[in-house]
Image (cartoon, rainbow, N blue to C red):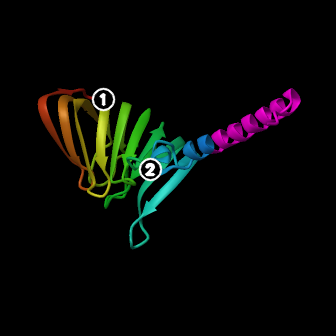
Amino acid sequence: MRFLSLKQSTISLLLLLAILSSAWSILLSKKNTPFSKEDLAHEPDAYMENIVATVINKQGTPVLKIESPHMVHYPENDTTYITRPRVTIYRQSPEPWYINSEYAEATHGVEQIVFSNNVIIHHPFDVADPNTTMETTSLTVFPNKQQAITPDAITITQPDTVVHAIGMQANLNDGTVKLLSQAKGDYVPNA
């Protein structure tokens, strides 16, 4: 019976360890691939800076414009997180609605946009409506339906009038605003 020398045994053992280590490394790298669908769903698939995007209808008329210094889209819930959005909603009237806030989340494209933190809605004077500014903490807008709602406190300012209320529903196309509760108005004549 022939035994391996100490030198041969050591070389054989090191060679076996190198083979096992390589096999283990290959198995781990295949298991933790960064491209699995489950892992990618939690990662953004689009990152945009200094955006100016205009959505048009079938006739080629602008219906919505979004401006933002920063937007990130996540495919998992089809949500886009928007920093300091400036949104313009065009309507039948010559003057559009302008909506600004600190943050917004748009889901399913722009089917629903939820604005939060220092939300300001503005409509300049036109033939149908007076100059109007609304302020609230959150606002949900449905651009395709031309509707906006908030359950929060809202302040509406028009020439000579300031109205405070809790909750609001607005038809952005025709400019009608329904206040939901605790509405109080002040007549403040301009000097």
- Give residue 120's position: percent from left, percent from top: 37, 35
Q: Residues within 10 Å of mark 1 (few under 14, many from 20)?
A: few
Along the line of sight, which residue is nearer the eye, 190 or 36?
Answer: 36
Residue in front for this viewpoint, 123 or 146:
146
Q: Give the residue drawn at x 55%, y 44%.
A: 31
Question: Where does the N terminus fall, quadrant-wise?
Answer: top right
What secondary structure is marked by label 2? loop
> Which secondary structure is most common in the magenta stretch?
helix
Kindly give the residue lying farthest to the left in the view shown: 181
- Helix, strand or loop at mark 1: loop
Q: What type is the residue that disc 1 sits on?
A: Asn
Residue position marked by numbered label 1 in the rendering: 190
Please provide percent x and percent y for residue 141. 30, 46
Query: Where 140 sits versus 137, above or below?
Result: below
| Residue 13 located within the stretch drawn in magenta | yes
Q: Residue at x 64, y 39 (%)?
A: 24
Which sits earlier in the primary sequence, circle 2 or circle 1? 2
**Residue 75 badge:** 2
Amino acid type shown at disc 2: Pro
Q: Which residues are magenta?
A: 1-26
x, y percentage for residue 96? Answer: 37, 52
Q: Alpha-carbon distance for marks 2 and 1?
A: 51 Å
Q: Is residue 100 visible?
A: no
> Could you tell whether 136 is left or right of 183 in the image?
right
User: Which residue is found at the position 24% from the left and 26% from the top?
Assistant: 188
Neighbours of disc 2 within 10 Å: few (<14), some (14-19), many (20+): some
